[in-house]
Structure formats: C-alpha cells, structure tokens
Amino acid sequence: MTLEADVLAAYPADFPIPAALVASTLAASNAETPRVLVVLDDDPTGTQSVADLPVLTQWDVEDFTWAFSQSKPAVYVLTNTRSLDPAEAAARNEEVVRNALAAAGSSADSNADSSLRLAFVSRSDSTLRGHYPLEPDVIAATVSEVSGEATDGVVLVPAFPDAGRVTIGGVHYMRGTAEAAGTLLPVSETEFAKDASFGFATSVMAEYVEEKSKGRFAVDSVIVLDLNIIRAGSAAQDPAISAKAIADAIEGATNSTPIVADIVTENDFRALALGLEEAERRGKKLLYRVGPPFVRGRIGQEVRTALTAEEAYEGNTPSTAGGLIVVGSHVGVTTRQLNVLTAEHSSASIIEINVEKLLADPTEAATHLDQTVDTVVEALRGGDVIVHTSRLLIKTDDAAESLRIARTVSAAVVAVVNRTLKTFPPRFVIAKGGITSSDVAAHGLEIRHGIVRGPMLPGIVSLWEPVDGPAKGIPYIVFAGNVGDDDSLAQVTRKLSNTF
C-alpha cells in the first residue's frame, strides 16, 4: 500500500469551485437548445450520487418522451448490461441510443416537434468492471450512423471518492479501510480485479485501455488529464485556468481517442466539467465512460445531503407491514454488512434462498421458490424480512457460465420479490448488489419510470420513488454490493424500519 498524502504531494492542491458556477456555465451553453445527458447505466447503482433526476427501466421512444418532459439535465436508463454477454450488451446499447435520439428529434424517423441536444454517458463500475471498450464503441457508432456526428474522444472517469476510489497520476486506487486509513491500494490488487467476467491486470489507466482494447488503443495514444492539468488554476484559485488547460489537452483527440482524468475531490469533478464544457464549446464531440459521481459534477448539481426517514416517505403514507431487504451480492463487504444487520436487527426474520437448490432440477427449484415466497409473506406481517442468497459462491472459470448462474439466481430473487409485492406489499424494499437491484427494480417491482430522490447515506446508496406500477409509492433503495462500511446496510434499514 501507498500513503495517499505521499502520492498527492507531487501535485497542486485542489481549490474551491462552486457547483453553481458549473450550473450557470451549462445554462449559458444550453440557452438556445437544451442539452440532456443520457446515462446508460450498466447497473442501477450509478444513481447513488445524484438527486431529483428521472430514471427509466424501459427505453421505448415513449419512455424517453416522458423522461425528457421532466426538463432535467440528465436522464438515467437502466440497461443492466453488466449482467449480459457482449453481443446482448451491444444490441441493448444501440437500441437505447437510437430511441433516445428519436425521442429528442435527432434522427430521421423522429416525430418530435423540437430537438434536444443529447450527450451520452456510459456509466459503469468504479472498480473497472464492465463491457469496455465495447459500450462506448457501440454508442459512438450508433450516434454516427443516426446523426452523422463522429466522436472525437471517450473520457474515462472511474473515480468515486465517496466510496474510496480515486485516480491519481493516471493510476486508479482504492482507499484503505479504517485499519489502513490514509493508504491507497491499486485497484488491480483488489478482489474486483479477479472478477470472473470482467477481470483485469493493471491499475494504470492507459495500460488498462490497451489491455481491454486488445492493443487497438496503445498506451501512448491515451490522453491523461492528471492533477497538474485538472488543478492548473490552483495557484490563482481560478477555475477558468483549469478549464483552458483541460480543453487544450483534449484538442488533439480524434476518432474516439481515450482520455483519462485524475479525480480525488468534488472540486476536481467540477474543474473537469468546466474543461469538458470548454472543449465541447470549441467543437469537440465527447462520450463519457464513468463512475457514479461524474454526472453530478458534470451538471453542476450540489452534493445532496442524505435523506432523512421523513424525506424517504415524503408524499406517501408508509405501510404498517415490514420492510423487505434483499441481498444478492457476494463481495466481501456485502457479506460483512449482512452479518452486522442480522446481528443487530434481532426482530427481523432471516430467510435464505438456497442457490444449490435453484441450480438443481426445475421441480426442486420451483418448490423451493414457492416455500420461500410463502415464508416471506407470512414474516412481513410481523416485521422486517431479510432475504439473502446462500453465501457459498458457486464459481466457474467460464465467464458465460458465471453469467448464467448469476441470472438464474437473480431470476429467483425477482420472483420472490414480485410475488410478495402482489400478495402483501412491504413498507420499503432494499436491494443489495448491482444485478440484484437492477432486476428487482425492472422486474420484481415492475418500475418503468421513477425519480431518483437522493442518497440514503452521504454520496452512496440511492432512493428511487416509483411513479407507476404496483410498487408506486414504496421507497426503493438501490444499494451497490461494493460500497459502504460494515454498518451501512443496518444504518439504511434503521432509517426506514418501524421495528428496528
């Protein structure tokens, strides 16, 4: 491990940049034709850093028409492509982009009366897992085919400081936990780099680009916006100096040149946003491949304080039923959080979905699901219910088989949630894990349109308000598998529960 202070010593200090400055700069740029960021979120946890934005789990033209009618600077689309194979992920990205452009009046087959300008964001994992460079490639190709607009650069910003992920000197790190506070661990040395489907070998972002692109983008072709550039205005405390330095550095980008950005603080995000806006004002066409907080910085949104229990239920009357906490993720932090929750929440019922039974013959799997639903419904009548998949992770070296197992498990979780919802609706629903929370939202709760109200914990863990479907009015908490400390799941549950 490396001390963060030692790494940062080589660079200028950050300096205050108000979110309002970014917002006003964007407002001036958008005065004539509004621009909306369309965020293709490969699992729903990308919404955890923003507030008061529309989110879609379906992406027909009519869905985008509803989302654009909200007159917000960004729209999230839950693609869930991290759970798909590459061909499926590519097809879904293309479909989303085509329909968004049609709804915005940017394509020949659009019936829209007026145009919006769209910019596309491929939101993925802050620990570098996901379909890269496939997804930005497909988005760029589709935009080019539909609108004739070529992409000059793809900006990679995986940093998520709220969750301990930062990029310094073009190297992506994870901050140490409480026992190792103040240290940095290259992300390639974490469990996430060993992911069965999306593993990687390096934390140096330019090398990561070369590795994942199989040499199509060589290391020396990657533009690195290090902290010397991001913080160029530090000495003068002048954001305009940083914006110019960033735009100048991007000037040579062409044909989807990869552009990597250092980020450590919220001020760095805002400096980057001003620089990207300047580059686009000069005519650069950019796509973004990012972690969760990028959009907040890019649209000049203030950091939303964590929602209170009262705010979580605002406008709705909470049910007297128990809440439903669904845990599917297997990463270490999730298992620790589950252990703390079950130890502290003594009145909650704990129900396990046995993965081995799900993968057995169909009859046994169906019987197990029926019994699980009956048990959950009965338990909800008396209080909160924690439903978790068995903690023994069934591993395989085959990436496709790993995805198949993940889908089978997720389908079972979805069935339990959906059948429970339609039998005895819970007070709230928390879903822990990326694939889990995506499938629970779209299929378990049948949310088509929602509003991201804000975070349940500072900078992490998102509350959605479903605006239609059988879950309308039930707070839905999207909780990534790899964020928070050991007590975070218990903290969120405690806010929402009437029995904890």
Image: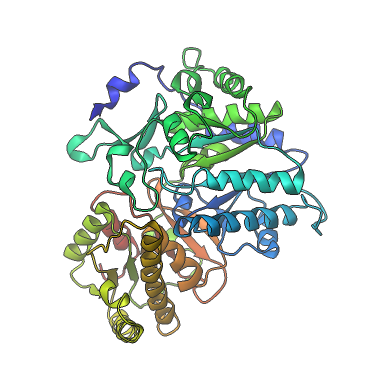
Depth check, front residue: 431 or 257: 257
Residue shown at 34%/38% (left/top)?
201
Which image quarter holds the C terminus? bottom left
Write down the quadrant of residue 92 in the picture: bottom right
Residue shown at 62%/62% (left/top)?
59
Does residue 157 sit above or below 243 in this rendering? below
Does residue 292 sit above or below 24 in this rendering? below
Write down the quadrant of residue 479 in the picture: bottom left
Depth check, front residue: 170 or 24: 170
Which image quarter holds the N terminus? top left
Q: Position of residue 42 (x, y in %)?
A: 49, 53
Q: Position of residue 75 (x, y in %)?
A: 60, 52
- Outermost residue on the top side: it is 235
Write down the quadrant of residue 170 in the picture: top left
Q: From this viewpoint, is residue 428 visible? A: no
Q: Position of residue 388 (x, y in %)?
A: 28, 69
Q: From this viewpoint, is residue 112 visible? A: yes
Depth check, front residue: 105 or 36: 105
Compared across the picture, whether 52 is left or right of 406 comes to right
Q: Position of residue 444 (x, y in %)?
A: 45, 73
Does residue 275 sit above or below 459 in this rendering? above
Residue shown at 73%/40% (left/top)?
149
Compared across the picture, whether 117 is left or right of 497 comes to right
Compared across the picture, whether 489 is left or right of 162 comes to left
Tell me how the rendering is colored. rainbow
Depth check, front residue: 294 or 187: 187
- Count of all numbered marks drawn on residues in the image: 0
